[in-house]
Image (cartoon, rainbow, N blue to C red):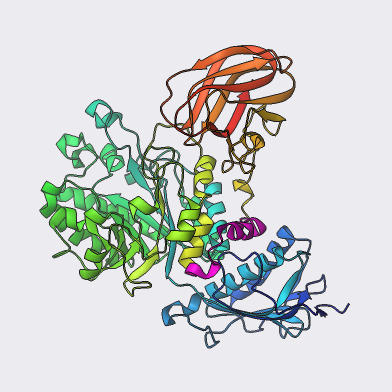
Amino acid sequence: MLRGAPIASAAATNSAPPGVVPAIQQWNGGTGRLVLTSSSRIVVPADAPAGVSRLAAQVAAELSELTSLKLGTSTGRPAVGDIALRVNPSADFGGAKPALRPESYRLSVAGGSVHIDGGGEKGLYYGTRTLLQAVLGSPDRASLPVGTAVDYPNYAVRGFMLDVGRRYFTPEFIKSYLHWMGWLKLNTLQLHLNDNELSAPNGDWSQAISAFRLKSTDPEFAGLGAEDGYTREDWNSFEDTAAAHGVTIIPEIDSPAHSRAFIEFKPELGLNNGNSDHLDLSKPKTTAFMKTVFAEFVPWFRGPAIHIGIDEYPTELADQFKAYVNTMAPYVRSLGKQVHAWGSFSAMSGGGAGYDKGMVINSWNNHWYSPRAATADGYKVINSNDNLLYVVPFAGYYHGQGLNGEDIFKSWEPHIFGGGQELAVQDPQLLGAMPAVWNDLVRANYTELQVHGLVNKSFDALAQKMWSGGAAGTDYAAFQNRVASVGKGPGTSYLGPRQTPGDLAYRRPVAASSTETPAFPASHAVDGDASTRWSSQYTDNQWLSVDLGSAQRVSSARLTWEVAYGKDYDVQVSEDGANWQTVAERRGRTTAGTDTVTFSATTARYVRMQGITRGTIYGYSLYSFEAFA
């Protein structure tokens, strides 16, 4: 077969490329397939911008990571079998809105070669995501269906917000998410950089957990940044990764509420003589200090916008609040940045009259400031509706077990806010959507990968609905098959299954008294994947046991419960898998999440959770069951 030659085929016209998430907007299929070989190249025009040449090298590396293809790069004119990349703003991008043409692309597989035209460098990057996903979805993981894709986003903001203020997330995690977001054509990551627990222990805010995650080297700010925070070098690595994957980072420095970290640094700036998480806006030095914080860190940020918070301040101080907003918003703009904020003006002042109008509003709660109120006041809005889009890991509120991906896929789009507050589809004042993870439970015991397990339930569906709405159809099972075929893309191995150091149960043989369905087997409790789980039938007295392979000294077990948790259960051990000894009892548990059970060190080959009483009407469901020496 000639290099890159289409395979002769009498098959029907190709359907849209398999395994593409989110689904493309338009597809004109041909017949046959084009096979990429070791002779294929990734070619860019001789006068291409440097970013296009970097993208060619990146795609070659990604193909090598994901497949057996080892492609070289070149400049000039493409030959048969090559992949040609170019930025071409005048290309036909179908129904793309003029403002979104830079993120649009055409991918044509014809005449024995591939041509990707991007409306801008970001659109070209997205075209290469479709290329890579289509290759992964092919039977041989080396070919593409002949045809032309024309693709573009429905919304300008396709985002995700992560609260790193209340809980530290490692740079590896954040960079892995930037890779994954680009893979799904999500383009905005907001990092909520400071916050504190919701209430003070015994009313004493000096005992509250709080953090500001940026660490300046300026002595003036020594002690403000948390020890487990991000240096300028860390932040540069975030910005570099984001730029390579079509993502813009929006840093959020939240005030005048959620500001305990600033008050801890300067107690004189807090309400109630510093015993508060609210800044005292009656003092001019408070606003002056916050200006110095923004001035210090704005040079770190490469994106066009900064989020200034401004939500949930005491309503009796609305006049001071309005003056603060109307001072800080123009100040941040004077530093060269656009301003984003959480919507709060209805609860604070009965509406947006008199507030700075140069901000983009995250509409997070229909009472605090609904999307219809915000758009009527002239603001552009982003859908971050709390009832629909908030995840508070392992809490009993705000989707503590993650959003339901199937519900998102079948029932939600960015114009849907609930409570009779829907906007028109692609309303010109609706920029898009930004679901959020809020780590309210600062004292709870869970990991960043367990948070990922919750996000993983709906991330692909959210990306689908933000990019091309219902273009993926209505068959959620078929959509999930697409998701499985494309995975999370290159550079995301950190998010994959992994063994907790010292876990004796990792990938060991496992058995259970029952499974709810074949989708939730017992093996999921020991696979190291925070997004998979075992689930039993809906009765008490169910169990799950692990064979450690040989006699081991064991002194603790860690169980991470899904919403269907065990209220009463025992941890038992056995030498033969038949005769069991109870080494720890757990009684009266009231929540899902992680439970670590310790006991006197004992020698055993088998360890099991023996359920006694369920905590819900469902069965027993574990994301993980770990055992430690």
Q: Over which residues does the magenta segment extend? A: 468-490
The answer to whether residue 144 is above or below residue 453 is below
Is residue 230 among what the camera can see?
Answer: yes
* Closer to us: 310 or 483: 483
Residue 309, x across and y down, in percent: 29, 54
Residue placed farthest to the right in the image? Answer: 1
Taking 380 as reference, is 614 above or below it? above
Based on the picture, tell me whether residue 485 belongs to the magenta stretch: yes
Residue 438 is one of the magenta-drawn residues: no
In the picture provided, is 471 more to the left or to the right than 281? Answer: right
Q: Main secondary structure of the magenta part?
A: helix
The residue at the point 72 percent across, 30 percent down is 509
Number of dots carrying numbers:
0
The answer to whether residue 506 is above or below residue 322 is above
Q: Is residue 282 shown to the viewer in this render? A: no
Residue 447, image x, y percentages: 51, 37
- Residue 484 falls in image quadrant: bottom right
Q: Can you give x and y, in whole percent of width and height, for residue 29 in the image? A: 67, 80
Determine whether, in the image, residue 134 is placed left or right of residue 375: right
Q: Position of residue 551 (x, y in %)?
A: 74, 17
Among the 4 quarters of the image, the one containing residue 146: bottom right
Up/down of 61 relative to 283, above or below = below
Residue in view at x 71 percent, y 30 percent: 508
Residue 83 found in image quarter = bottom right
Nearer to us in this view, 336 or 117: 117
Quadrant of the image for the N terminus? bottom right
For the C terminus, which image quadrant?
top right
Residue drawn at (78%, 79%) of the image: 81
Q: Choose between 419 and 618: the one closer to the eye.
A: 618
Left or right for 216, reference 269: right
Between residue 431 and residue 313, name the one nearer to us. 431
